[in-house]
Image: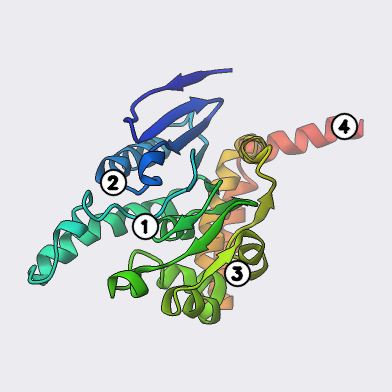
């Protein structure tokens, strides 16, 4: 078992253990409102997940009353660009956040969001870019930007959320500013599973360990091919399936699985 910690700050903790990289929001005094410093730690973690072979899974979770109450507008570059800011300046600051969520979505390793409490605004957008989303029974989800800021949740709260739950529920969350409970989030497909508050972290860790134990190349290509299928016509998607499997059936991972199966049969 290997374990490392550090490279976080007082608002976010970073831990590494057995191939699982975990980031934990620890800014409970501000309901884990997300700052640029917290995003910087997340950017570094995503880059490490991408570049380091010993890291297999990223888990993003939190401690305290909320997973996050949303973005701290006084502590993000986008929040500093108010009315009158030239469009290119605003969009440049905004693009950095988009690029982070795009990288999370594109990286060929699994990323998990585990909301132990209410998850609002940027938390929902972050979750929509992740591969797996879990909620405790105490969680709820909402996008208050239209109601509270007269702005859109434009870092995936519209585009990615619509792909996940459809326009029907995206309008409920983003246009109407309504919230959904953990059970409702499960029923509409926003989260994969809801676990009791007691034992929530252990259940998420168990899932992450199972992912980390799976064949690395096959897991990465599965993510790539699934996302490609979501944005392709049926014929193109099946071509991609065949190409990817051609690579995998000639891999050492596949041969090892076949050999292990043969040994069990004997």
Decide if residue 13 is on the left or right side of residue 236.
Answer: left
Mark nearer the N terminus (2 vs 1): 2
Mark nearer the N terminus (3 vs 4): 3
Query: How many numbered discs?
Result: 4
User: Is label 3 in contact with label 4 (beta carbons under 8 Å)?
Assistant: no
The answer to whether residue 110 is above or below residue 6 is below
Residue 232 percent across, percent down from the top left: 50, 74
Residue 101 is drawn in which quadrant? bottom left
User: Is label 3 in contact with label 1 (beta carbons under 8 Å)?
Assistant: no
Asked whether 42 or 230 is in front, the reply is 42
Mark nearer the N terminus (2 vs 3): 2
User: Is label 2 in contact with label 4 (beta carbons under 8 Å)?
Assistant: no
Disc 3 packing (10 Å; few <14; some 14–19; many ≥20)? some
Q: Which mark is residue 264?
A: 4
Where disc 3 sits, the SS reads helix
Where disc 1 sits, the SS reads helix
Q: Please name the residue that numbered disc 3 is placed on.
A: 238
Asked whether 224 or 168 is in front, the reply is 168
Disc 1 packing (10 Å; few <14; some 14–19; many ≥20)? some
State how the image is colored.
rainbow
Q: CA distance from mark 2 to mark 4?
A: 52 Å
């Amino acid at each position: 078992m290997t374990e490392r910690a550090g490279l976080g700050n007082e608002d976010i903790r970073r831990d590494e253990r057995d191939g699982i990289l975990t980031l934990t929001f620890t800014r409970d005094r501000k309901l884990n409102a997300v700052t640029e410093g917290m995003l910087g730690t997340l950017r570094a973690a995503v880059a490490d997940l991408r570049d380091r072979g010993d890291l297999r899974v990223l888990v993003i979770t939190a401690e305290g009353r909320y997973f996050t109450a949303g973005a701290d507008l006084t502590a993000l570059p986008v929040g500093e660009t108010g009315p009158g800011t030239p469009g290119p300046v605003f969009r440049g600051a905004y693009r950095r956040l988009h690029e982070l969520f795009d990288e999370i979505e594109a990286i060929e390793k699994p990323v998990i969001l585990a909301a132990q409490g209410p998850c609002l605004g940027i938390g929902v957008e972050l979750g929509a870019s992740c591969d797996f989303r879990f909620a405790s029974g105490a969680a709820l989800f909402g996008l208050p930007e239209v109601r509270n800021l007269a702005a859109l949740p434009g870092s995936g709260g519209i585009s990615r959320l619509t792909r996940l739950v459809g326009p029907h529920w995206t309008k409920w969350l983003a246009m109407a500013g309504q919230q959904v409970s953990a059970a409702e989030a499960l029923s509409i497909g926003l989260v994969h599973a809801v676990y009791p508050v007691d034992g929530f972290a252990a259940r998420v860790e168990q899932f992450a360990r199972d992912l980390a134990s799976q064949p690395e190349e096959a897991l990465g290509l599965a993510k790539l091919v699934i996302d490609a299928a979501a944005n392709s016509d049926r014929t193109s998607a099946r071509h991609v399936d065949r190409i990817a499997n051609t690579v995998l059936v000639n891999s050492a991972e596949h041969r090892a699985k076949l050999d292990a199966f043969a040994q069990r049969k004997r």
